[in-house]
Image (cartoon, rainbow, N blue to C red):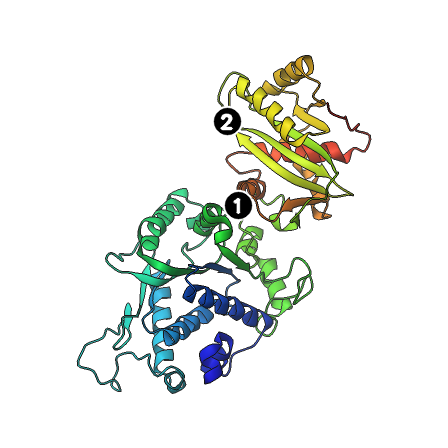
């Protein structure tokens, strides 16, 4: 009992002696334990756990809620999900655990109303609210867009805020869900409250995607894929996440019967837009630092018209390593031609590229002529010889071979990955054009490396 009070993983085994034990449950329990430690330290933690369906994540979260209530019966928890059924199921699971004799022996100070509780006050115990006897804490379940006016929380739990692909494809639904979370749910947080989210990633622009974009490193994201896409500390590439529960053979059969985009979202936590997925974001190599002394190349995809504020202009900056191409920076901005030339010169001064690639079309043609006439900038005109899809397809093998590396973190990374993942059905493809322009150019070893000023 003492160990179960201290350790969430020990508590899980106490409360559910028949639990199937896999490495990922232990790993997730470790992260939840740290989440608790951060909460009591006043660090206002935000933890997102992405895991496949039917792998026990909802059970794990309800057990964590009850463990936290045992540690602190004054903790006020609000649990929100896309459906009333999910909330009621979590509510009933908590009630069952609170009523267990072994739970009461472990946490005797956390009680809920019932025939064995003697009190002069009436404490709620229904399908929407569980109040802890003689304490201020409670468990409250509601739906996304449900009313929580006048309530406060110390633990906010988000369980699948969007129902599925159809709803996730609707920008109206994504906007509505995000507005409720920001304007209602998040405004209920106490000073040191923690946020815990468990979900399936259906869309790159889903609420968690937006939260990650807004808060960056303040949000910790733990992703568990049904089948490993790379070697991991606990398993090899191609191995199942929880073979004791879902064998690799079963996962393969599920994958073979599903649409690729549904499999990627549900089981691999790779949100993509239907019709996209020419490139999987998970295939990119990742880097924390870039070696010094590498050749630098900039690739410009300019707006279509030199004298109009039309599509954005994009410049990607690259460092060429030993058979690895490191993405250093992505510049995206809508601007008229005078600002375009100034931006090009400014980024040249910042990164000192050895080569500057500029698409020889529309405003790019004007920029090439201007720079060649007035500067010594090492400009190479690039004339596209095929359509956008063909250009990207021609360099996907370089990505799959691990030759293209993205940073682990950057302010521009989310937007870049979103456009790459959604291509060719994204609203914009300018970052893709700059990206594929560089890769197609660098594939040709006969291309000269021009030395700058």
Question: Quarter of the image holding residue 357?
Answer: top right
- For label 1, the SS is loop
**Which residue is pictured at 70% across the width and 38% down the height?**
319
Looking at the rendered image, the quarter that the N terminus falls into is bottom left
Q: Is residue 372 left or right of residue 258?
A: right
In the drawing, what numbered circle is on residue 297?
A: none
Question: Depth-wise, is mark 1 or mark 2 nearer the camera?
Answer: 2
Left or right: where does residue 203 sit relative to residue 193?
right
Q: Is residue 368 left or right of residue 2?
A: right
Q: In the rendered image, which quarter is residue 186 located in?
A: bottom left
Residue 157, x across and y down, in percent: 39, 62
* Secondary structure state at the residue bearing disc 2: loop
Nearer-the-camera pick, 257 or 44: 44
Assess disc 2: are there few (<14), some (14-19) or many (≥20) residues with their C-alpha within 10 Å of its C-alpha.
some
Q: Residue at x 41, y 55 (%)?
A: 163
Give the percent coordinates (x, y) of residue 439: 70, 36
Q: Residue at x 73, y 41 (%)?
A: 292
Where 196 falls versus 274 (above or below)? below
Disc marking residue 334: 2
Q: CA distance from mark 1 to mark 2?
A: 27 Å
Residue placed furthest toward the top: 373
Count of all numbered marks drawn on residues in the image: 2
The residue closer to the viewer here, 276 or 179, is 179
Instruction: State which tag comes first along the sequence, 1 or 2.
Output: 1
Task: Identify the residue shown where x is 35% and y is 58%.
Answer: 191
Quadrant that contains the C terminus: top right
Disc 1 target residue? 274
């Amino acid at each position: 009992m003492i160990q179960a009070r201290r350790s969430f993983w020990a508590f899980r085994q106490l409360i559910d002696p028949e639990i199937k034990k896999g490495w990922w449950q232990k790993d997730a329990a470790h992260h939840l334990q740290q989440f608790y430690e951060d909460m009591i330290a006043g660090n206002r933690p935000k933890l997102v756990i992405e895991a496949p369906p039917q792998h026990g994540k909802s059970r794990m979260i309800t057990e964590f809620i009850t463990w936290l209530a045992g540690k602190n019966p004054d903790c006020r928890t609000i649990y929100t999900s896309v459906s009333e059924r999910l909330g009621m199921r979590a509510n009933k699971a908590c009630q069952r655990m609170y009523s267990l004799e072994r739970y009461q022996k472990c946490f005797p100070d956390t009680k809920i109303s019932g025939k064995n509780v003697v009190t002069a006050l009436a404490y709620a115990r229904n399908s929407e609210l569980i109040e802890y006897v003689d304490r201020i804490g409670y468990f409250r379940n509601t739906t996304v867009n449900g009313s929580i006016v006048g309530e406060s929380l110390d633990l906010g739990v988000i369980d699948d805020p969007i129902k599925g692909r159809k709803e996730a494809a609707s920008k109206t639904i994504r906007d509505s869900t995000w507005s409720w979370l920001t304007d209602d749910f998040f405004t209920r947080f106490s000073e040191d409250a923690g946020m815990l989210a468990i979900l399936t990633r259906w869309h790159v622009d889903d609420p968690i995607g937006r939260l990650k974009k807004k808060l960056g490193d303040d949000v910790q994201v733990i992703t568990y894929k049904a089948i490993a896409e790379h070697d991991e500390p606990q398993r090899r590439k191609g191995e199942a996440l929880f073979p004791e529960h879902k064998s690799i053979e079963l996962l393969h059969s599920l994958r073979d019967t599903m649409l690729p985009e549904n499999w990627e979202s549900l089981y691999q936590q790779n949100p993509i837009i239907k019709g996209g997925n020419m490139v999987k974001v998970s295939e990119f190599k990742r880097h924390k630092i870039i070696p010094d002394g590498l050749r630098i190349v900039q690739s410009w995809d300019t707006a279509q018209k030199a004298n109009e504020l039309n599509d954005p202009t994009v410049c990607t900056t690259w460092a060429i390593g030993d058979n690895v191409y490191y993405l250093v920076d992505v510049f995206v901005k809508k601007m008229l031609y005078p600002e375009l030339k100034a931006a090009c010169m400014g980024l040249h001064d910042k990164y000192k590229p050895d080569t500057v690639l500029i698409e020889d079309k529309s405003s790019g043609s004007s920029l090439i002529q201007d720079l060649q006439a007035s500067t010594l900038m090492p400009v190479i005109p690039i004339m596209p010889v095929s359509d956008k899809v063909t250009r990207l397809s021609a360099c996907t093998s370089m990505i799959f071979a691990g030759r293209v590396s993205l940073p682990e973190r950057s302010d521009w990374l989310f937007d870049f990955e979103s456009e790459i993942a959604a291509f060719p059905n994204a609203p914009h493809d300018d970052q893709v054009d700059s990206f594929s322009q560089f890769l197609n150019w660098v594939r040709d070893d006969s291309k000269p490396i021009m030395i700058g000023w």
